[in-house]
Amino acid sequence: MPALIRKTLTFVETTLIEGGKAAPVPLTLIGAAAVIRNPWAGQGFVEDLKPAIHDAAPGLGELLTHMILDAAGGAAKVEAYGKAAIVGLDGEVEHASALIHTLRFGNHYRQALGAKTYLAFTNIRGAANTPVMIPLMDKHDEGRRSHYLTVHFAIPDAPAADEIVVALGAATGGRPHHRIGDRYQDLKDLGHDLENPASV
């Protein structure tokens, strides 16, 4: 059966000033979360997680993708992305992992954005009000360090012991005053031949 959703929430944070200096372009971080009943709650150890993954993950991926795009103002505005899940204390970390580490969940978001990179992630167990921390990276270029960001929020009453918080994150740009360079500059400085993938 589809995920039993108790509540959803959208988190939006816009940074106008960073380090005492105005941002050339304001940076918006977005999180979209669904609080669902753990589909394996009360069943003891479940060997085969696939039936519930196939039932729940596609709808969650579609719902959260729409929530992100609505908050961002469209797919073109999203430059960085990620995902996260927190399972309540009666569940396994594998339950959190199961719902986000499947193409049935992530492909909704990836395809909507035309993204090329994998979705950065966290999956943990925690009590209500455990911080949701969604690591982000550029949707096209995993070496673009300006877009290494984290969406960070908490839900005071979730996850309950028999629930899972499932979330997607987004950023509309990179850090306002990024100045640490990209991974490729480090590789070049260390003598790697960037034209030859075997040397990296």
Image (cartoon, rainbow, N blue to C red):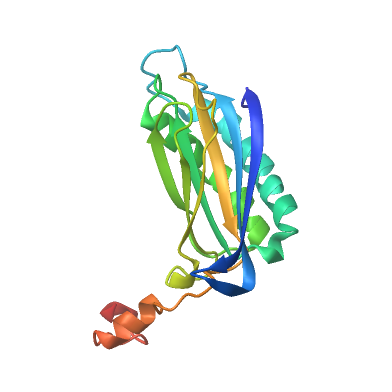
User: Which residue shows up at 39% across the image and 36% down it?
Assistant: 124
Residue 101 seen in the current view = no
In the rendered image, the vertical position of residue 113 relative to residue 132, given as above or below? below
User: Which residue shows up at 37% across the image and 76% down it?
Assistant: 183
Q: Is residue 121 left or right of residue 189?
A: right
Residue 38 seen in the current view = yes
Location of residue 91 (image quadrant): top left
User: Split into 4 quadrants, where in the image is the N terminus?
Assistant: top right
User: Which residue shows up at 42% across the image and 25% down it?
Assistant: 48
In the rendered image, the vertical position of residue 39 relative to residue 136, given as above or below? above
Q: Nearer the viewer, residue 59 or 129?
A: 129
In percent of width and height, residue 194 lies at: 35, 85
Given the current orientation, which residue lies at the most extreme front position?
Answer: 20
Q: Is residue 51 left or right of residue 75?
A: left
In percent of width and height, residue 101 lies at: 46, 43
Given the current orientation, which residue lies at the most extreme left position?
Answer: 190
Q: Nearer the viewer, residue 97 or 156?
A: 156
In percent of width and height, residue 139 lies at: 55, 64
User: Which residue shows up at 53% across the image and 33% down it?
Assistant: 165
